[in-house]
Amino acid sequence: MYLKNLSLASLFAVLSLGALTANAQDSVKPHTYMYGDHLDIAKVLSVKQGSGSGCGVVESRMTYLDSTGTIRALDYSALAQGCDQDN
């Protein structure tokens, strides 16, 4: 019985920690990347690419942890995933 309660408590703790991280990602003010910026990226949490039709440049956002454990967001331009690498 004790092991079952401990397992349930651990599961709820892990799930609530994931929800806190997701909420924190949405509340972070993004920084727009400029060529030459020094980026302190320890771990990438998510990458979201803007929708674009066909092949071309789209706006993207990367949410990451820096070396101090602070959640940060970076907006940047990237080539759309739908490109077939045509020359």
Image (cartoon, grey):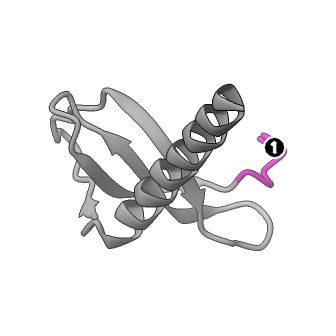
Position above or below: 46 against 4: below
Q: Looking at this view, is 39 or 64 the one in front?
A: 64
Q: Position of residue 67 (x, y in %)?
A: 19, 27
Looking at the rendering, in which quadrant would you find the C terminus? top right
Q: Position of residue 4 (x, y in %)?
A: 71, 33
Residue at the (42%, 67%) spot, across then down: 23
Q: Is residue 45 magenta?
A: no
Q: Answer left or right for 29 relative to 43.
A: left
Residue at the (81%, 43%) spot, across then down: 86
Q: How many numbered marks have been drawn onto this rendered protein structure? A: 1
Q: Position of residue 58 (x, y in %)?
A: 57, 65
Position above or below: 30 against 15: below
Would you say residue 61 is visible in this rendering? no
Crowding near pointer 1: few (<14 within 10 Å), some, many (20+)? few
* Type of the residue with mark 1: Asp
In the picture of the structure, the residue carrying the numbered disc 1 is 86
Q: Looking at this view, is 42 or 37 the one in front?
A: 42
Residue at the (57%, 62%) spot, across then down: 57
- Per the rendered image, the range of residues in magenta is 81-87
Would you say residue 15 is visible in this rendering? yes
Looking at the rendering, in which quadrant would you find the N terminus? top right
Q: Position of residue 16 (x, y in %)?
A: 50, 55
User: What is the residue that sits farthest to the front in this orientation?
Assistant: 1
Q: Looking at this view, is 19 or 2 the one in front?
A: 2
Q: Answer left or right for 65 relative to 52.
A: left
Q: Secondary structure at mark 1?
A: loop
Position above or below: 42 against 48: above
Label the magenta part by its dominant secondary structure.
loop
Q: Answer left or right for 85 relative to 16.
A: right
